[in-house]
Image (spheres, helix red, strand yellow):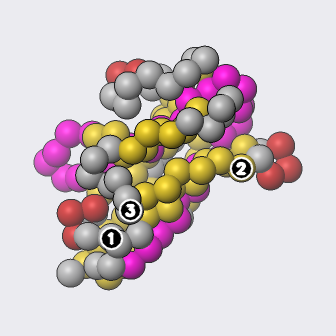
Amino acid sequence: QVQLLESGGGSVQAGGSLRLSCAVSAYLNICMGWFRQAPGKEREGVASIHAGDGSTYYADSVKGRATISQDSPNAKNTVYLHLNGLKPEDTAMYYCAADFSIRCRPLYQGNFPYWGQGTQVTVSP
């Protein structure tokens, strides 16, 4: 069983930055994704990274404003999502998700069987 724990959400003003973190209990042949869900909207993929080759993917909505990266501090692997130039429309609950695969599949929630509890990001005008 894979455990994921997000942190780093908060409230910021438009134009600000946040770094979200996701600690993962198992990190071998794994694709990590960040998703977000705003009230009344469907969950959408934001970015993904594969632990094997570090390949990344970004949704058009965050391209140029987001950076996904990975780290392995003290054998507790962590994936980060750095968001800058935040806009009010970025307000959402952000979730990290995991899929054991040799490469990342398309960034749809159905392709990721493991999920964290989420961390809230609120951007004020």
In the image, residue 96 lies at what x, y percent? Answer: 49, 43
- The residue positioned farthest toward the left in the image shown: 40
How many angstroms separate mark 1 from mark 3 (CA)? 8 Å
Task: Identify residue for label 2.
Answer: 71
In the image, residue 90 lies at what x, y percent? Answer: 28, 61
Q: Which one is nearer the viewer's eye here, 51 or 118?
A: 51
Marking on residue 86: 1
Earlier residue among tags 2 and 1: 2
How many angstroms separate mark 2 from mark 1 (CA)? 23 Å
> In the rendered structure, which segment of residues is drawn in magenta?
16-43
Measuring 28% from the left and 47% from the top, which residue is drawn there? 60
On the picture, is 41 further left or further right than 35?
left
| Magenta stretch: includes residue 94 | no
Marking on residue 65: 3
The quarter of the image holding the N terminus is: top right
Q: Of the residues shown, which amino acid type is indicated by label 2?
A: Asp
